[in-house]
């Protein structure tokens, strides 16, 4: 996603999960260009296929230290620094961040 606001303006009304919406709005308010790819249940919530998910899963091409600084700036608390599954908390919402396509085992193409 280029500039968080693009994706969220399109999808923000599809989710009935207030904490997920709060997370998306926090990211959009940072007004920083990052790429986030919703995965699993999170993608299904944003697509309107299901209404809730136990945690939020995103894949990012942003480097860990940059993402860490952004999420901390947004007020999230880091629970695990693992690069396998970097865990953050926004109140009671668990947010799992995966870096550099590690979860799929290959780098994402430039396009």
Image (cartoon, rainbow, N blue to C red):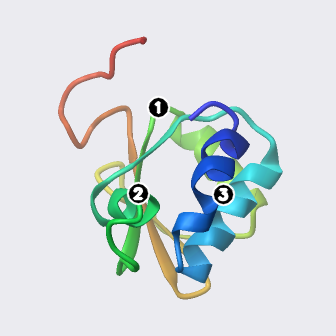
The mark total stands at 3
Q: Is residue 72 visible?
A: no
Q: Real-space Cα distance between discs 3 and 1?
A: 15 Å
Q: Which mark is residue 61?
A: 1
Residue marked by disc 2: 47
Taking 14 as reference, is 101 left or right?
A: left
- Quadrant assignment for the N terminus: top right
State the residue at coordinates (61%, 85%): 91
Residue 107 percent location from the top left of the image: 29, 22
From the image, tell me which residue sits under label 3: 71
Percent x, y for residue 23? 63, 66
Residue at (67%, 39%) from the top-left corner? 6
Tell me the residue at 35%/81% (across/down).
54
Query: Where the C terminus falls, by quadrant?
Result: top left
* Residue sticking out furthest to the top: 110
Residue 43 seen from this side? yes
Closer to the observer: label 1 or label 2?
Answer: 2
């Amino acid at each position: 996603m280029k500039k968080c606001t693009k994706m969220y303006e399109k999808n923000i009304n599809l989710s009935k999960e207030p904490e997920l919406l709060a997370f998306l709005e926090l990211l959009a308010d940072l007004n920083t260009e990052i790429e986030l790819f919703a995965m699993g249940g999170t993608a299904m919530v944003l697509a309107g296929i299901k209404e809730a998910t136990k945690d939020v899963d995103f894949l990012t091409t942003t480097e860990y230290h940059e993402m860490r600084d952004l999420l901390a700036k947004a007020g999230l608390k880091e629970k695990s620094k693992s690069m396998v599954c970097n865990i953050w908390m926004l109140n009671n919402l668990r947010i799992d961040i995966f870096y550099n396509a590690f979860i799929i085992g290959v780098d994402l193409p430039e396009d």
